[in-house]
Image (cartoon, grey):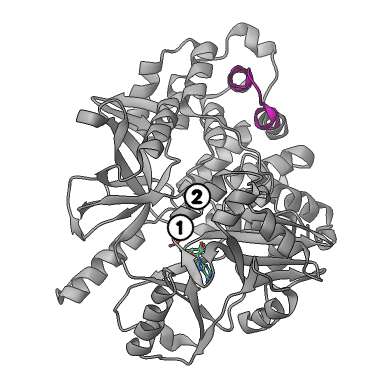
Amino acid sequence: MLAFANACDDIAALPAKNAKIERLATYLQTLEGDDLRAAARFASGNPLAARDDRKLAIGGRTLLAAAERTWGVDGTLVSLAYRETGDLGEALARVAREPAALDLFSETLTPGGFAQMLDELASASGKAAGKRREGVCERAFRACRHPREVAYVAKILTGDLRIGLREGLVLDAIAQAFGREVATVRRAAMAAGDVGAVALAARAGGLEDIAIRYGAPIGFMLATPMTFGSSYRELAAGTWLVEDKYDGIRAQAHIRGNTARIFSRTLNDISRSFPEVVAALAACPHDAILDGEIVARRGEAILPFRYLQPRLQRADPDAALQAEIPVQFVAFDVLAAADRFLLDEPLVERRTEVAALVARSPALVVAPWHTLEPGASPETIAELFDAARARGNEGLMLKRTDAPYVPGRRGKWWLKLKRELSTLDVVVVAVEWGHGKRKSVLSDYTFAVRASADDATLKTIGKAYSGLTDVEIAEMTKWFLDHQTGSKGRALRVAPEIVIEIAFDVIQKSSLHDSGFSLRFPRIVRLRIDKRASDIDTMGDVERIYKAMLDREGVDV
Ligand code: AMP
C-alpha cells in the first residue's frame, strides 16, 4: 500500500488535472490482477465496487478503538491531531508508531489484500459484527509499515481520499495507462459499475466484452440550479424540454424479462419498499433501464415528500399501507433498451423510446413534457412554473433536447428551477446538546458545504436548531453519538455523513465560519437520506446564490 499512498500524496500535490491523471496512470501500469482492481477502486474513492450495495459501516469510533489496540495511543491524542488536520486519516498517521517487532512478521498490506479485508468488513453482520469490524481494522493497521499507509487505509475505510480525483479522472487514467480510447473506457464503466473491473479489462484488452449488466445501477445524471426570477439567459443556448420537478425519490428501474429492480440515488436496491411499482415495471414488454422519480399520488394529486417516508422506511409494505400511500414511478429517461446503450442518443430520441417502452398503469406513467424554443421569455417560464406548483410539484426541470445522458454528472444539460433560491444541501460536521426540553438530545447542528466538486474539503457555513421531528432528532442523536470523532466544549465533532437541506432568508459575508459566509434564519427543511456527503452543494453554489441575491437587489458585486 505504500506505493498507493505515495501515488495519492503526489496526486494531491499536483494541481493540474492532466498531471493527476498522468501520475495515476503511471502507478496503475505497475499493477495487475487483484491489486489493479483494488487500487483503481480506491483511487475513485470507493472501498468496494460502486455496484456493490453493501456498506462498510466504519465510524470514527471503530477506527479509534482499533488504533488504540494497535499502537496503544489514547483517543485524546487522536482528537488533538484531528483538530489540527481535519482528517481522521492524517490524524491517525501522526499518532501511528513503528510496527511492533512481532508485527513485522504479520502480513504486509497490498491493495488486493486490503480489498479482501474490506470485503470481510462489508460482510460482517449479526451480534458480534462491531467487534469483528474493529478486529479487521486492527489487522489492517498492524500490517502498515509506514504512516502514509495508515493515512490511506483510514481514508479508504471512511470513504474519502481528498486528493481531488473523481471516478471520471480515474477512468481517464485507466485509458492512458493501457492505451485505450477514453470513450470505450467510460462505456465499459457504465456497464460494469466497477472501475476495478474496467481497469482489469483495459489491461487485458477486453473492454468491448463488458456488456450491460441489468441489476448493476448506473450513476444518475444531475441538474444545475437556475436562479428563480432571473432573465434565464442560459435558455438561449438551445431547445429545451420542460417537465415538472417532482418532489419524490429519484429511482433507476432495471427491467429484465418479467422481473424488475429499483435503485435509489445512493445506488441501493429499494425494490422491496415498492412492490406495486416493481410489478408495473415487470409488466413492460422489453428489457430496459429507466430513470424516473417515485412519487406518492392520490388520484391526480401529488402528495408532499413526507408522505413517502413511511414507504421508504418499510420493506414489504402490507396492503393497508399500499392503499394509504399509493405510489407511482414517473419515467423520464431511458439508459438502455435490450442490449443497446442509449446514453449517447439525444434526449428527444430517448424520450420517444421511453414512451414506447413503458406499459402504463396506475403505478407507472411517463412524465409529460413541453418543448421550449431557444430564448423563451421569463413570463413563459413563470407560467409553466406556476402550473407545475399547482400540480403539487416542486418546480421545473429543463433539459436540452440534444443532451446525452451523462451518468453521475451535474452539468449544464439539465437545469432545475425551484422557488426558494435559498436552500442548500449541506453535511452535518458537529452537533450540540439542546436546551430546556431538548437538553438530552443533540439538536443543534453545525453544517458545511464542499470546497468544490473536485475538492472534498468541508467549509462550515452555519448552525441551526433542528427543525426535524422529535423521533428523527432522537434517532439522529443515537447516530451522532455512535459516529463522534472528537469534542470541543459542548460540541461533538461527528463523521460528516448526514446530509440535510437548509433553507434560509439571506446569505452574507462573514468571518464567523470558514466558508467566509453565513446564513440568516437558517432552518432544517429535511434530512436528505437520499444524498451522500459527496452530493452536497459547494462553495461555487454558495457564491452563485450570493451573487444572484446581490443582482436582484441591484448591488454591484
Ligand atoms: P435536488 O434534489 O434539488 O438536488 O434536485 C435534483 C433532483 O430532482 C434529482 O435527483 C431528482 O430526484 C429530482 N427530479 C425531480 N423531477 C425530475 C425530473 N423531471 N427530471 C430529473 N430529475 C428530477
Residue 293, horizontal then vertical, whole percent: 57, 64
Whether the magenta-drawn stretch holds residue 58 is answered as: no
Identify the mark at residue 305; answer none if there is no mark: 1
The secondary element bearing badge 2 is classed as helix
Which residue, given by chain and number where applicable, does mark 2 sit on?
A: 309
Question: Which quadrant of the figure contains the C terminus?
Answer: bottom left
The secondary element bearing badge 1 is classed as helix
Position above or below: 181 against 101:
below
Q: Write the residue at 60% across / 45% down.
A: 43
Q: Nearer the viewer, residue 525 or 208?
A: 525
**Relative to 379, 5 lies left or right:** right
Position above or below: 279 against 155:
below
Residue 505, horizontal then vertical, whole percent: 21, 60
- The amino acid at mark 2 is Gln
Q: Quick check: marks 1 and 2 in contact, CB under 8 Å?
A: yes
Whether the magenta-drawn stretch holds residue 127 is answered as: yes
Asked where in the image residue 219 lies, by quadrant, the reply is bottom right
The magenta-colored residue range is: 119-139
Residue 111, horizontal then vertical, whole percent: 68, 34
Question: Which quadrant of the figure contains the N terminus?
Answer: top right
Asked where in the image residue 88 lies, by quadrant, the reply is top left
